[in-house]
Amino acid sequence: MCLNQKTRGLILIVLSAASFGLVPLCAKIAYANGLTPYSFILFRSIIAAGALFALLKQRGTGLTVKPGHLATLFKASFFGYCMMMITLYVSYNYMASGVATTVHFVYPVATMTGAVLFHGQRTNSQKIAALLVSLLGIYFLVGAGGSAGFSMKGASLAFVSGLFYAYYILTVSYSEIKGLNSFVLVFYVSLFNALTLFIICIFTGQLNLDFNATALFSVLMITLAVNIVGMVALQEGLKVINPSTATILSTFEPLTSLVIGVALLNETVSWHHGAGSVLILISVVWVALSEKKLSRDLESLEQGN
C-alpha cells in the first residue's frame, strides 16, 4: 500500500511522539542505577552522535554542511533541544513529574502562536479546537489530582522547557536546515548537545561515572528510541506536516507513557486517565482527518486548474 506524503507525515509524527513516551521509563531506570539527569542526557547525546556518525559513514552520506547551516544547527541544539531537556528534567526535582509534564505541554500553544505571528502560517478553528481538547486531555492524563506536587520554581522550569522546545520545532521547520538529510540534522543536534552538556557537567560537577550496566542499557534504549527513531521521524514528518499540526499530534506522547507505565510498572489507572486518553485520541484523529481533508481539497484544486 502506497501512502501519500501527508499520511506518511502524520504517521511519522505519531511514531515520534510514541517514542518520546519511553523517556519516563528509561529515565527512572537510569536514575535508580546511578545516573543523574545531567549525565543521563549527556551519555544519551554522546551515544546518539556516535551511532549516527557510524550509520551515515556506512551509508556513504556526507556530513558537510554550509557554515550558515552549522550556526542554525547550533542554535536549534543549544537554545532548543538541549535547554529543553535540562529545564524539564531539573523541574522534576521540584515537583511531581506529571504536573511538570502538564506545564511542559505549553509547547503546542507556543508553537502554533509562533508559527502564526512570526512565520505567517494560517490556522483554523478546527486546529485550535483540537489543540484545546488535547491540552485538556493531557491535564486529565498526567496532571489531575497532582496539585499537591506544585512548585512555582518547578512550574517555571517546566514552562520554559516548553518554550525551548517550541523554538526547536519552529527553527527546524522554518529555517534553511529543514532541507537537510534528517539523519545528518539529528547527528549535528546530538553532537552539539553532547559538547554543551559535557562542558556544563564539568563546571557543575554533574559528570557522574558511578553507574551500572542497567543504567547504561536504559541510555542505549532511549538513544535508539528517541534520538535515532523519534527525532529523525519528527524531522521527516515536519517536512510535509506544518509544526502546529505536528505538536497537536505530539500529545500522543503522554498516552504512550501511561500505557508503558501500566504494562511494565504496574501503575494504576483512574477515571481521569481514561478521560484524558479518550480526549487525546479524539484530538489526534480530529487533526489527522482535518489534514487529510485539506490535502484532498488541494489535490482537487490542482486537478481543476
Image (cartoon, rainbow, N blue to C red):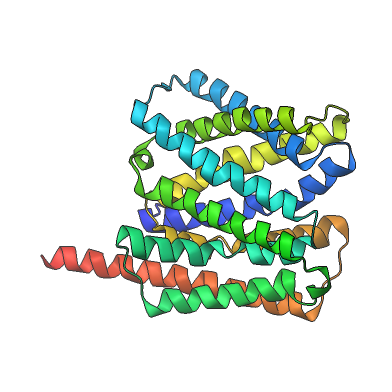
In this picture, is 251 found above or below 23? Answer: below
- Residue 165 placed where, x, y %? 54, 52
Q: Is residue 181 visible?
A: no
- Residue 280 placed where, x, y %? 60, 72
Q: Is residue 139 left or right of residue 228?
A: right
Residue 119 vs residue 218, the one in the foreground: 119
User: Could you tell me which quadrant the C terminus lies in?
Assistant: bottom left
Q: Is residue 53 left or right of residue 125?
A: right
Residue 182 vs residue 174, the one in the foreground: 174
In this picture, is 56 found above or below 165? Answer: above
Q: Quadrant of residue 197?
A: top right
Write the residue at 42% across / 47% down. Answer: 171
Write the residue at 84% across / 43% down. Answer: 31
Residue 207 vs residue 224, the one in the foreground: 207
Q: Is residue 69 left or right of residue 225?
A: left
Q: Is residue 70 visible?
A: yes
Write the residue at 54% across / 73% down. Answer: 283
Q: Quadrant of residue 150?
A: bottom right
- Residue 200 placed where, x, y %? 68, 33
Write the residue at 34% across / 59% down. Answer: 118
- Residue 79 placed where, x, y %? 52, 44
Residue situated furthest left in the rendering: 305
Residue 125 vs residue 110, the one in the foreground: 110
Q: How many marks?
A: 0
